[in-house]
Image: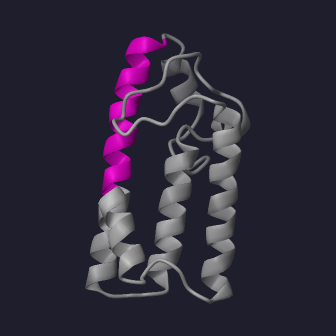
Amino acid sequence: MVGGLIFLIVTRRFFSASPLVIVPQVAALGLMVWARVTFGRRSFHAAANPTAGPLVTTGPYRHIRHPIYTAACGLTVAGAAAHPGWATAGGCALVLGGALVRMRCEELLLAASHPEYREYAARTRRMIPLIF
């Protein structure tokens, strides 16, 4: 994920002056901030292992299981849409693929450490409410 993001930023394929890109990227940033505030002072791990503490099911986590990854993917897809091309698609694919792998790893670890996770996962979607 990080490699794809860095590539898109360095090659100037991440941001755009178009309102069609700015609006969804600002919305994604808002989701990311909301999720971080809801998550609290717990640390972010470079590995996909969950942090210690209770399962967070409030705020954006009430509707989707991975709002921070959703925000990162939203930022990336919006920026990539403004800069079509194979290199942009490759960078975007790295971010999206990395997010999907991390989500799956985290879900397995959360299910093992939090017995209530399976019930939570059954009533929420990974990234897009009611869809995925």
Judging depth in this view, the residue of 30 and 105 nearest the camera is: 30
Depicted 122 relative to depicted 101: above or below: above
Quadrant of image for the N terminus: bottom left
Residue 75 lies left or right of residue 105; in this view the side is: right
Residue 69 in picture, x, y percent from top left:
49, 49
Residue 60 lies in the magenta stretch: no
Q: How is the image coloured?
A: one colour
> Which residue is drawn at the image coordinates 64% and 84% (left, top)?
20
> Which residue is drawn at the image coordinates 64% and 33% (left, top)?
39
Residue 95 lies left or right of residue 67; in this view the side is: left
> Which residue is drawn at the image coordinates 49% and 86% (left, top)?
82
> Which residue is drawn at the image coordinates 48% and 60% (left, top)?
73
Whether residue 85 appears in this view of the structure is yes
Residue 122 in picture, x, y percent from top left:
53, 27
- Quarter of the image for residue 57 reads top right
Residue 39 lies left or right of residue 114; in this view the side is: right
Q: Main secondary structure of the magenta part?
A: helix
- Quarter of the image for residue 17 reads bottom right
The span shown in magenta is: 97-114
Depicted 59 relative to depicted 122: above or below: below
Residue 88 in picture, x, y percent from top left:
34, 79
Residue 104 lies in the magenta stretch: yes
- Quarter of the image for residue 92 reads bottom left
